[in-house]
Image (cartoon, coloured by chain):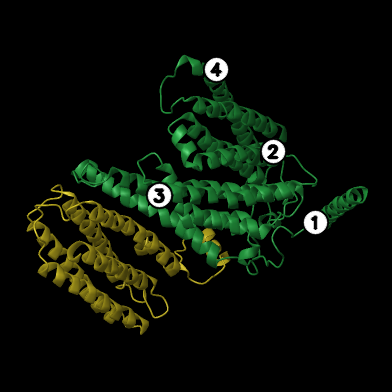
Chain colours: A green, B yellow
C-alpha cells in the first residue's frame, strides 16, 4: 500500500515545473525502491502462502515430493531486491547530504538519478547469487555471477559522483556530513567485499562463514544505518524546528564509526580463517578477533545513548532552527521549520535544475577551480613533453 | 482498501474543515493506485504459476501417477459464467456513466449472483473430487491455486456488495464520481483474467 502511494504520488503529484530530472535524488531512489517493493514483495507472499500450506495443511510444495530449492528461489527473488529497497534511499540521503555540506551541486546528477534506477533493474536479475552453494547448475551460476558483478557499475557511478562532489570543495563537517562520509567510506568495504562474494569460486570458498556476515553488516549497518543517522540529523531541524546539539552529535558519530568498524571488520579475517556463522561458540584460535568484535559491539551499544539523549532533549529545548540551517538547496529548505500544514503556504514553482536553487556563486567558483586544475595538468604535461 | 476509501472529505471539527479547505484540489489518481495494486497482486499469482510450471517440467510423470482425471464440464461452465460476468459488470459502469443508478444496481446484482454461482460450483467440485489437499504435488497445487483464486472471487463479491450498499445513498455514485464502481470492476476483470490463465494451466495443459 505504501508502495502504491509513493509511486502514484511521485509520478503524478509533483510541484509545477518539477520534471522527473529536477527531482531530488532522494526522491529518485525512493521511487526506484518502491517500484522494487511493489513488484517483488508479492512473490514472497506467494511463497509464504505455499510454505504455510506445507507446514499447517500438509501440502507438498517444498518437501521431497516438491522442490525445496524452489522456495529458496522464490525467497531470494524477493529478498535480494529488498536489500536495495533499504539501500537505495540510503544512497539518496548521501546524495542530498554530501552536496549540501560541500556547498556543491551533486556531480553528474542525471547519471546518479539513472544509476538508482539501473540498480533497481539490475537487482531483479541477481538473486541466484544467494544460491551458488545450493547445487545450482553451472550455466546459471555463470549467468548470475555476471549480472551480480554488473551491479558494481551503477554503484560505482554513485561513489564516484559523491567523491567528485566533495573534491576541492568547502567542506562543512557537521554531524550529518560526518555520518554521510563515514557511511560512504564503509560502503566501499561493503561494496568491494560484495564484488568478491559475487565471484562464484570465492563465494563457494567462504560460503556460510563470517565473511558473508561481515559483508552484510558493512552494508546494512555501516552504510544504511549511517545514512539513516545522517538523514535524521540533516532533517531534524526541518522536522522539529529545533537544532540538535552539535557536540553530542559528533560524539555519537565517532563512537558509532569506531564501534561499527571494531565490531564488523574482524568478521572478514575470521571468515577467511574459516569461522562459520550461526554458531554459539567458536574454536579458541579465533578468540583474538572475536574479543575485538565483542568490545566493538558494546561500544556500538553505548554509542546510541548520546543519540537518544540528544534527540529527546533537543526536540524539547533545542535552540530554534532557521528555515535553512545548512544552506541546502532542496525544495524542503524553502519552507519554514517545521513546515506548515500541507508543507507550503503556496504550491512552489520549480524552474531551476536540482541542487542549484541558490549560491550560484559557489557553483561557478567550483567550476572555475576544476577548469584551472585541468589546465594546470595540461601545462604540466606539455612541460613534461618539452623537457622530454 | 478500495471498498473503504473516503469518496469525499468527511468534515467534522473546525480544524478539519479548515484543513479540507486548505488542501489543494488535484486530479483523482486513485485508479492509477488500483492499477499498481493489481500489478503487485498479479505477482503473487505469477509466483505460484511459475512454481506450478516448474513442477510440471521437473517431475518425470505429470500429474503424478494415481491422480484421477479432472472433470472438465463443471469448471468449463464455471469459466463461461465468470467470463461473461465481466461483461455484465461492465454494463453497470456504462449505466452509472449515464447517471442511471438503478441500472448500476441491477447489473452489479446480476454479477454478484454469477460470482456466487461460480463459488458454489467450485465448492461442489471440491466436494466431489477423489483426491485431497495432501495426496500429491499436483493436488496440492490444484487446491492452493484454485483456493487462492476463490478467495479473490470472494473479495470481489464483497466489493460488489459495498458498491450495492453505498449506491443506496442517493447521489453517492454519479456520472462524475464512480471510483468505487470502476475500482471494483477492474478488480473483477483481474480476477477473471487470472482464472482464464489458471484454467488453462491446471485443467487443460
Q: Residues within 10 Å of mark 1 (few under 14, many from 20)?
A: some
Label ID, residue A140? 3
Q: Earlier in the sequence, mark 2 or mark 1?
A: 2
Q: Is residue A345 above or below residue A231?
A: below
Q: Is residue A3 above or below residue A223?
A: below
Q: Which residue is mark 1?
A: A363
Same subunit, labels 1 and 4: the answer reads yes
Same subunit, labels 3 and 2: the answer reads yes
Say what secondary structure mark 1 lies in. helix
Q: Which residue is mark 4?
A: A288
Farthest residue to the top: give it. A284
Q: Earlier in the sequence, mark 4 or mark 2?
A: 2
Q: Earlier in the sequence, mark 4 or mark 3?
A: 3
Q: Earlier in the sequence, mark 3 or mark 1?
A: 3
Q: Residues within 10 Å of mark 3 (few under 14, many from 20)?
A: some
Q: Mark 3 belongs to which subunit?
A: A
Q: Residues within 10 Å of mark 2 (few under 14, many from 20)?
A: many
Q: Which residue is mark 2?
A: A178
How far apart marks 2 and 1 lie (CA) works out to 22 Å
Callout in the foreground (3, 2)? 3
Considering depth in this image, is B59 or A370 the residue closer to the camera?
Answer: B59
Say what secondary structure mark 2 lies in. helix
Q: Mark 4 belongs to which subunit?
A: A
Label ID, residue B91? none
How far apart marks 4 and 2 lie (CA) works out to 30 Å
How far apart marks 1 and 4 lie (CA) works out to 50 Å
Query: Is B8 on the left-hand or right-hand side of A268?
Result: left
Considering depth in this image, is A266 or A350 the residue closer to the camera?
Answer: A266
Residue drawn at (54%, 29%), measured in percent from left and top?
Answer: A268
How far apart marks 4 and 3 lie (CA) works out to 39 Å
Callout in the foreground (4, 2)? 4
Amino acid at each position: 500500500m505504501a508502495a502504491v502511494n509513493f509511486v502514484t504520488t511521485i509520478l503524478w503529484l509533483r510541484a509545477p515545473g518539477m520534471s522527473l530530472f529536477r527531482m531530488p535524488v532522494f526522491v529518485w531512489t525512493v521511487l526506484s525502491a518502491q517500484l522494487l517493493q511493489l513488484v517483488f514483495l508479492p512473490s514472497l507472499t506467494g511463497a509464504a502462502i505455499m510454505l504455510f500450506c506445507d507446514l499447517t495443511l500438509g501440502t507438498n510444495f517444498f518437501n521431497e515430493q516438491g522442490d525445496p530449492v524452489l522456495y529458496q528461489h522464490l525467497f531470494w527473488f524477493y529478498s535480494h531486491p529488498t536489500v536495495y529497497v533499504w539501500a537505495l534511499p540510503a544512497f539518496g540521503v548521501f546524495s542530498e547530504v554530501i552536496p549540501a555540506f560541500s556547498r556543491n551541486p551533486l556531480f553528474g546528477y542525471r547519471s546518479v538519478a539513472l544509476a538508482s534506477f539501473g540498480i533497481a533493474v539490475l537487482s531483479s536479475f541477481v538473486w541466484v547469487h544467494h544460491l551458488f552453494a545450493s547445487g545450482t547448475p553451472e550455466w546459471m551460476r555463470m549467468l548470475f555471477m555476471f549480472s551480480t558483478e554488473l551491479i558494481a557499475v551503477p554503484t560505482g557511478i554513485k561513489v564516484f559522483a559523491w567523491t567528485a562532489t566533495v573534491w576541492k570543495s568547502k567542506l562543512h563537517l557537521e554531524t550529518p556530513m560526518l555520518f554521510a562520509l563515514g557511511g560512504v567510506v564503509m560502503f566501499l568495504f561493503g561494496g568491494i567485499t560484495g564484488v568478491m562474494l559475487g565471484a562464484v569460486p570465492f563465494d563457494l570458498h567462504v560460503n556460510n562463514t563470517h565473511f558473508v556476515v561481515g559483508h552484510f553488516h558493512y552494508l546494512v549497518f555501516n552504510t544504511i544505518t549511517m545514512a539513516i543517522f545522517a538523514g535524521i540529523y540533516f532533517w531534524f531541524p526541518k522536522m522539529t524546528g529545533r537544532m540538535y546539539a552539535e557536540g553530542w552529535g559528533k560524539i555519537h558519530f565517532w563512537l558509532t564509526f569506531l564501534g561499527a568498524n571494531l565490531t564488523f571488520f574482524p568478521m572478514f579475517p575470521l571468515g577467511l580463517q574459516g569461522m562459520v556463522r550461526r554458531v554459539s561458540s567458536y574454536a579458541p584460535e579465533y578468540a583474538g578477533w572475536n574479543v575485538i568484535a565483542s568490545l566493538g559491539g558494546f561500544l556500538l551499544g553505548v554509542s546510541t545513548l548520546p543519540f537518544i539523549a540528544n534527540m529527546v532533549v533537543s526536540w524539547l529545548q533545542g535552540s530554534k532552527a532557521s528555515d535553512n540551517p545548512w544552506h541546502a538547496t532542496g525544495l524542503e529548505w524553502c519552507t519554514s521549520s517545521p513546515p506548515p500544514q500541507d508543507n507550503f503556504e503556496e504550491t512552489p514553482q520549480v524552474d531551476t535544475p536540482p541542487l542549484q536553487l541558490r549560491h550560484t556563486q559557489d557553483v561557478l567558483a567550483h567550476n572555475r577551480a576544476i577548469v584551472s586544475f585541468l589546465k594546470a595538468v595540461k601545462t604540466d604535461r606539455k612541460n613534461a613533453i618539452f623537457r622530454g | 482498501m478500495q471498498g473503504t476509501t473516503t469518496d469525499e472529505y468527511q468534515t467534522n471539527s473546525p480544524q478539519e474543515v479548515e484543513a479540507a479547505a486548505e488542501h489543494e484540489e488535484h486530479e483523482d489518481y486513485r485508479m492509477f493506485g488500483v492499477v499498481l495494486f493489481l500489478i503487485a497482486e498479479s505477482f503473487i499469482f505469477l509466483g505460484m504459476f511459475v512454481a506450478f510450471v516448474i513442477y510440471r517440467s521437473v517431475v518425470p510423470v505429470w500429474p503424478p501417477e494415481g491422480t484421477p482425471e479432472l472433470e472438465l464440464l463443471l469448471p468449463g461452465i464455471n469459466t463461461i459464467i465468470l467470463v461473461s460476468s465481466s461483461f455484465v459488470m461492465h454494463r453497470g459502469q456504462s449505466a452509472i456513466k449515464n447517471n442511471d443508478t438503478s441500472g448500476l444496481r441491477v447489473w452489479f446484482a446480476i454479477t454478484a449472483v454469477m460470482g456466487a454461482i461460480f463459488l458454489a460450483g467450485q465448492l461442489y467440485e471440491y466436494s466431489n473430487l477423489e483426491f485431497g489437499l495432501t495426496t500429491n504435488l499436483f493436488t496440492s497445487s490444484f487446491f492452493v491455486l484454485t483456493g487462492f483464486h476463490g478467495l479473490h472471487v470472494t473479495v470481489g463479491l464483497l466489493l460488489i456488495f459495498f458498491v450495492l450498499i453505498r449506491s443506496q445513498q442517493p447521489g453517492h455514485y454519479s456520472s462524475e464520481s464512480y471510483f468505487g464502481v470502476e475500482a471494483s470492476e477492474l478488480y473483477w476483470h483481474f480476477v477473471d483474467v487470472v482464472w482464464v490463465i489458471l484454467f488453462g494451466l491446471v485443467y487443460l495443459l
